[in-house]
Every structure is written in structure tokens, then in C-alpha cells.
Amino acid sequence: MIKIFLKKIYVFFHSVLKKYRMKNLKIKVSNYYKENFSILSLEEREAFDFFLYKGFYVFPYSWCDNYNSLKFRVGINRGLPCADVFGKKMFFKKGWSELQVNSYLRGIYREQDLNSPHRYITDYFHPIKEDLVLDIGVAEGYFSLDVINNVSKILAFELDNTWDEPLKQTFKDYAQKIEIFNFKVTDTIKSISERKIDDFSICFTMPIFVKIDVEGDEMKVLNGMKEILKINKKVNFTIACYHYQNQAQEIADFFKSINFKYEFSNNFMFYVFDKNLKEPFLRRGVIRASNYIDF
């Protein structure tokens, strides 16, 4: 009884603190917008205007509403919830309800909308038949499932082992084309559950397309493949760059230092999940880079 009571107290105060933080953040964002309006780009103003109209959304754009009513038929197969994505069955974590699967997929579809700042690929920048794809932070496998029929091979990496079985089931018909690894991709090996991309000899000789989305550890992944980047002359990257303040610039500086061309995705994000979110508040979502393609 005492544990239940304490948990309720914790939930209550956590909710109060969250509302207080968001209220203060809203005031700071509003003031920043008013004070800097004249120097903001039209692209930035669009995002701030949406914020003033509807409040905090990670993607502050009206097209997000297009996915509110999107509904997937969820079944159970091999003991796991699943739904059709790209005409194939995608599997999810054991015990997830239909509501959870639908909510999760709507979020993924918003992320990869053509207008989304979180979109990994474009019509002109995407994996091709000769590419070895490294999907680092594969999670549910959406990106790999999207491109698997159009590439040579995929190496998929996911630290969260609760995705192991769903991923095995999602890609069971592609056993010859994808390898799935359950360990942390980093730059300094401290345990048997960690690896560097430099340890994979295949990455030195094949054209590689690298997608990285690892909750803020993207630079560690890059630093763990420096030897490959010295040798391989055909490397493309698409990298999440919004997890902490100035991450986008940090990754851009890294690519400048090794003479890679790069661009940012269009539009901005309000990454309110970062409790340290501060001016200028808006963040770029994805940086794309290459040592052989001009943007």
C-alpha cells in the first residue's frame, strides 16, 4: 500500500513539474520569437507561428494532422503484434496493444513524411543497388524494411534487446540480405556488448550508406569509423542531429574537417524531450553527408 501511495505522489509531482516547465518554456519561446522576429528566416517564422497557434509539437507543421486518423490493422503472429508496412508484415514488442502499435506507427509516418525535418532520405539521396547499408539504431526496422529490396546488403544494429524477436520476425524472409546485431556501436570498447564500425572489414571495400539515430551518441559512432572514412571513397550518411543543443553544428564541423559535403533536412523540430532546450529553440532534424555527392 505504501509503495502504491508513494508512486501516486511521484506521478502527481512529476506531472506538476512537467506542466510548470512547459509553461515557462512557452513564455521563453514566445519572448524569443518577438525579440528576434526581424532576423528570423521565413522557414523559422513558419515554425514559430505554428507554435503560437497550436503550442508545442515536435514537428510544428500542419501536415502532421494528416496522420491523426491513420489506422493500421493489428494482428498477432508468432506471439507478437504485427501490422502491414510497405506491403510487408512489421512486428512489434510483445505485449503491445493495438493502440500502442497504431500510435507508434503514426509517429514513424510523421517522422518520414516528405516535409519532415526527420526524413532520412530524399528523391536524390538514398541507398542504391550497390550499397551496403548500415542501419545504426534500427529500432523497429522501418528504414531497413523500406530500402531492403533496393540495396546489396544491410547490417542493422540495435542496443535495445526487446526489439530482437520483432526484428527477426520482420526480416525472416531476408536472412541472406540482412544481419542484425544487438550491441552498442561506439568509439571506445569497454565491454563485450560494444563494437566500432571500424571492426567490420566489409565497410572498407563496399560503397556504404550509413543511417545513424542513437539518441545522442551519433558522434561516438562517427569517431568509431574514422579508419573507414580515410579509405572508403564512397560513403553517404543520414544522421539524426537534434538530440542535444548544438549537435547539428558539432556533426557539421566533423564533416567539414574530413572534407565531406553536407546538407540539413528542410524545416525544424521543437525537441521538447530535451529538458535543456534553449535558444534558438528550433533544431535541424537530420544532416546528410557524402564524400562523392554534391548537394
Image (cartoon, rainbow, N blue to C red):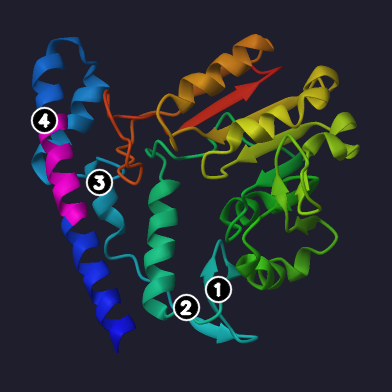
In the picture, measured across the screen, residue 190 lies left or right of residue 69, that is right
Q: Nearer the viewer, mark 2 or mark 4?
A: 4
Q: Position of residue 225 (x, y in %)?
A: 76, 30
Q: Is residue 42 left or right of residue 49?
A: right
Which residue occupies the foreground of this view, 60 or 23? Answer: 23
Q: Secondary structure at mark 4?
A: helix
Q: Which range of residues does the magenta coloring cover?
A: 17-30
On the image, the x and y values in percent for residue 126 come to 62, 35
How busy is the neighbourhood of tag 3: few (under 14 within 10 Å), some, or many (20 plus)? some
Q: Mark 1: few, some, or many residues within 10 Å (few <14, many ≥20)?
A: some
Q: Which mark is residue 57?
A: 3
Vertical position of residue 154 compared to residue 233: above or below: below
Q: Which mark is residue 96?
A: 2
Residue receiving disc 4: 30
Report the amino acid beneath label 3. Answer: Tyr
Of the residues under marks 1 and 4, which one precedes in the sequence? 4
Q: Secondary structure at mark 1?
A: loop
Picture quadrant of residue 246: top left
Contact? badges 2 and 1 (CB < 8 Å):
yes
As shown in the figure, which amino acid type bears the numbered disc 2?
Trp
How far apart marks 1 and 3 lie (CA) works out to 26 Å
Residue at x 77%, y 63% (from the top left corner): 174
Tag 2's secondary structure? loop
Label 4 CA crowd tier, 10 Å (few <14, some 14–19, many 20+): some
Q: Quadrant of residue 38?
A: top left
Q: Position of residue 88 (x, y in %)?
A: 61, 68
